[in-house]
């Protein structure tokens, strides 16, 4: 949600907020808000929305923003759009959110432009119009919004609303990444790793993945782990690979969980521990991740880290096969041939249970 530029009435509260004293900001903003200062009303709404210095109260935040919006305050329109789009105080309503964002965008509000463009790009609450979305993102990018630079990169990479142009995607991603935008850094790293729109550069790719990984992006954490595992763009280091996989796994990222399992299975960067490998494979498999389902099935079929169980193996192979994971097809066929009719019937019943639990 947007912050506000200061007015004389709101200035003291703003300074209190910026120095990390939201309670003092609330004390200073409230009388100004009650006197009708729209900057103070927006600021007080932010404190209420985030529960900073005041007990969280989204309904009260909305009331203050509505009062500021009556004075056509762009930040207020944008903030109302945010809680409306995501249903933070009720049912999500992207159509109403688009109308609110438009009131902010009409004043050149960068975040309002970006948010309205995102709805247009996806056709949520408004007719889909990628070209108009790109035009709005350009305006927001020209105002210095890194989110908009990243979105322009996505549009150019996808060829939606604009001609496909990987070089342009790289330029936009780089502009945002250089401002510390984690998603743009990850997107840039992906193009650098593949050599799309730019010369392939594993070292620079790893550098940008690190920026995104350190910001907590689990996809980037997995990619940086892969760099360390394979020695691409960084010195090969299995322990560092495990560390980055672990960070992603702790966020519930299925590929991160699977890779932690693989490292335990192979004894790379950690002590070899098949039972722990099974644990991590299962966590990812239950999220419907086919490579983890396949690996878990292997463990059951071989009795590796878990008691051998051909029925359980067949079930997990089958779940992976259903998602088109090619290595699982031959395994299902093999187990079909070795299982007797009673085991097959039990396996079918078990599969129905697992299918309802995973994914």
Image: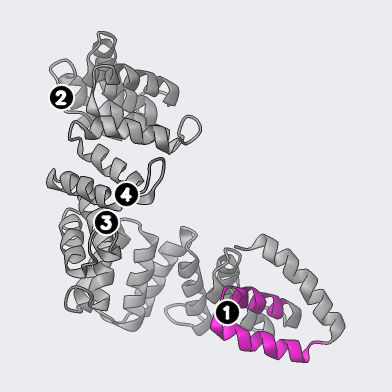
Between the C-alphas of marks 3 and 1, the distance is 41 Å
Toward which corner of the image does residue 108 lie, by quadrant?
A: top left
Instruction: Give the residue at x 28% y 64%.
Output: 159
Between the C-alphas of marks 3 and 2, the distance is 36 Å
N-term mark: 3 or 2: 2
Residue 345 placement, left or right of 175: right
N-term mark: 3 or 1: 3
Q: Which residue is mark 2?
A: 6
Between the C-alphas of marks 4 and 2, the distance is 35 Å
Q: Which residue is mark 3?
A: 161
Q: Nearer the viewer, mark 3 or mark 2?
A: 3
Q: Residues within 10 Å of mark 1 (few under 14, many from 20)?
A: many
**Which residues make up the magenta segment?**
312-339
| Mark 3 residue element | loop
Q: Which residue is mark 1?
A: 295
Q: Are marks 1 and 4 in contact (CB under 8 Å)?
A: no
Rendering coords of residue 279 (x, y %): 59, 70
Q: Which residue is mark 4?
A: 129
């Amino acid at each position: 949600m947007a912050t506000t530029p200061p007015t004389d009435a709101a200035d003291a509260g703003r300074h209190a907020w910026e120095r990390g004293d939201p309670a003092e900001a609330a004390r200073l903003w409230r009388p100004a808000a009650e006197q009708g200062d729209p900057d103070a009303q927006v600021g007080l709404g932010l404190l209420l929305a985030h529960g900073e210095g005041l007990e969280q109260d989204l309904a009260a935040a909305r009331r203050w923003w509505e009062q500021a919006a009556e004075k056509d305050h762009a930040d207020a329109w944008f903030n109302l759009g945010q809680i409306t789009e995501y249903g933070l105080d009720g049912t999500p309503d992207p159509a109403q959110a688009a109308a609110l964002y438009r009131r902010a965008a009409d004043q050149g509000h960068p975040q309002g432009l970006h948010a309205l463009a995102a709805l247009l790009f996806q056709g949520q609450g408004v007719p889909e119009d990628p070209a108009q979305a790109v035009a709005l993102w350009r305006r927001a990018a020209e105002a210095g919004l890194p989110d908009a630079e990243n979105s322009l990169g996505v549009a150019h990479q996808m060829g939606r609303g604009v001609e496909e142009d990987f070089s342009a995607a790289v330029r936009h991603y780089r502009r945002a990444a250089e401002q510390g935008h984690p998603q743009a850094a990850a997107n840039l790293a992906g193009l650098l790793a593949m050599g799309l729109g730019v010369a392939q550069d594993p070292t620079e790719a790893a550098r940008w993945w690190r920026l995104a990984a350190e910001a907590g992006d689990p996809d980037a954490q997995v990619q940086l782990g892969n760099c360390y595992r394979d020695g691409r763009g960084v010195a090969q280091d299995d322990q560092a690979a495990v560390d980055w996989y672990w960070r992603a796994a702790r966020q519930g990222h299925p590929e991160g969980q699977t890779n932690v399992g693989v490292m335990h299975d192979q004894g790379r960067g950690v002590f070899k521990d098949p039972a722990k490998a099974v644990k991590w494979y299962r966590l990812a498999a239950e999220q419907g991740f086919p490579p983890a389902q396949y690996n878990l099935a292997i463990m059951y079929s071989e009795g590796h880290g878990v008691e051998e169980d051909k029925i359980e193996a067949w079930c997990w192979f089958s779940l992976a096969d259903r998602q088109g994971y090619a290595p699982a097809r031959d395994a299902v066929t093999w187990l079909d041939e070795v299982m007797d009719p009673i085991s097959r019937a039990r396996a079918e019943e078990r599969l129905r249970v697992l299918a309802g639990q995973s994914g």
